[in-house]
Image: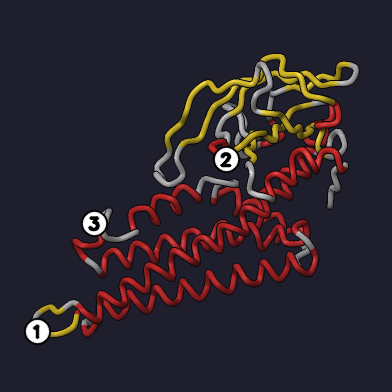
Amino acid sequence: MLYQAPEKIREKYLYPVLEGKTGWSMCFTEPEAGSDLAGIRTTAVRKSDHWVLNGTKMWRTGHHFASYTAVAAVTDPSKGPKGISVFLVDNDTPGFTKSRDIPVIARQWGTEQEVRLENVIVPAENLLGAEGEGFSIAQHQFNRFRLRLGGTALGMAERSQELAVEYARERKVFGKALGDNQAIQWMLTDNQYDIESIRLNTYYAAWMVARGGYSASRMQAAMVKAYCVDAGLRVIDRSMQVLGGRGLAIEDYPFFDFHNLLRMCKQMEGSTEIMKIVMAREILSGELN
């Protein structure tokens, strides 16, 4: 699915983001609906030339530099997933308010937010795509984000391995280089296994996207999300172990920030367990690429 917004909407919302003048955030998850996006309760009711949104959202992502937010809401409760739509809501719209900040374990990520929507008026033209396409839009976006996490895991794993190898070469213990010990060699070897697997999985998924778009790479995107994040965490953990006590130094080495950010990614864009369900359904469907 490729949605082309009207030029008026692109001028107001898309181009400023592409030019780096502002950012955007999104609100899909709710207190009672996370992995089950079809279970959201936020409503959008059409009133003449506008929509009125009411509900509560959790984990508003990207709010720090955003001027608007993509909000998923139910426009037709009788249609299940096909009754969900997405709206572009200006952050200064009356009734669109932050309930609280939610600090998360990755300090470079900052905070997430819980927000409330109380009779938020959104112009009809701010409906993203057609009414009822919100679930498909969300799935498309999640596939993009899941693939991106493969690159995140790869970069952090490669850097962790570089630091571990450097330390193993230079550190002297019992009269010889730390890297001369077989236990250290095996950890570095296992790291390389994981790094190459992350790279190949991520690159293959990117190739699948280039060939058939994000909808054709759902299996690969889920695999990148589930496998590459876990593999990256293993590399970071082993690298910290190679450095011994120095691996715990927050200011001297990036392992603390790497680990916390990648650990948070296990929950983001669908948990690892949900990704396995997605993969199982693709496998059982017999329609693998």
Give the residue displayed 85% in from the left and 26% down from the top. 124
The answer to whether residue 20 is above or below residue 110 is below
Rounded to the nearest whole Å, what is the CA distance between mark 1 and mark 2?
Answer: 51 Å
| Residue type, mark 3 in image | Ala
What secondary structure is marked by label 3? loop
The answer to whether residue 30 is above or below residue 191 is above
What secondary structure is marked by label 1? loop
Question: Closer to the observer: label 1 or label 2?
Answer: 2
Image coordinates for residue 106, horizontal then vertical, percent:
41, 45
Crowdedness near tag 1: few (<14), some (14–19) or many (≥20) residues, C-alpha within 10 Å: few
Rounded to the nearest whole Å, what is the CA distance between mark 1 and mark 3?
Answer: 25 Å
| Residues tagged 2 and 3 counted as in contact (Cβ below 8 A) | no
Question: Closer to the observer: label 1 or label 3?
Answer: 3
Residue that mark 3 sits on: 249
Q: Is residue 38 left or right of residue 186?
A: right
Task: Work out whether mark 1 precedes mark 3 in sequence or the reverse, and give the earlier one.
Answer: 1
| Residue type, mark 2 in image | Gly
Task: Work out whether mark 2 precedes mark 3 in sequence or the reverse, and give the earlier one.
Answer: 2
Give the residue displayed 25% in from the left and 81% down from the top. 169
Rounded to the nearest whole Å, what is the CA distance between mark 2 and mark 3?
Answer: 29 Å
What secondary structure is marked by label 2? loop
Q: Residue furthest right?
A: 48
**Picture quadrant where residue 55 is located:** top right
Q: Is residue 227 left or right of residue 277?
A: left
Residue that mark 2 sits on: 62
Image coordinates for residue 5, horizontal then vertical, percent:
85, 43
Residue that mark 1 sits on: 175
Count of numbered badges drawn on the protein: 3
| Residues tagged 1 and 3 counted as in contact (Cβ below 8 A) | no
The answer to whether residue 275 is above or below residue 21 is below
Task: Work out whether mark 1 precedes mark 2 in sequence or the reverse, and give the earlier one.
Answer: 2
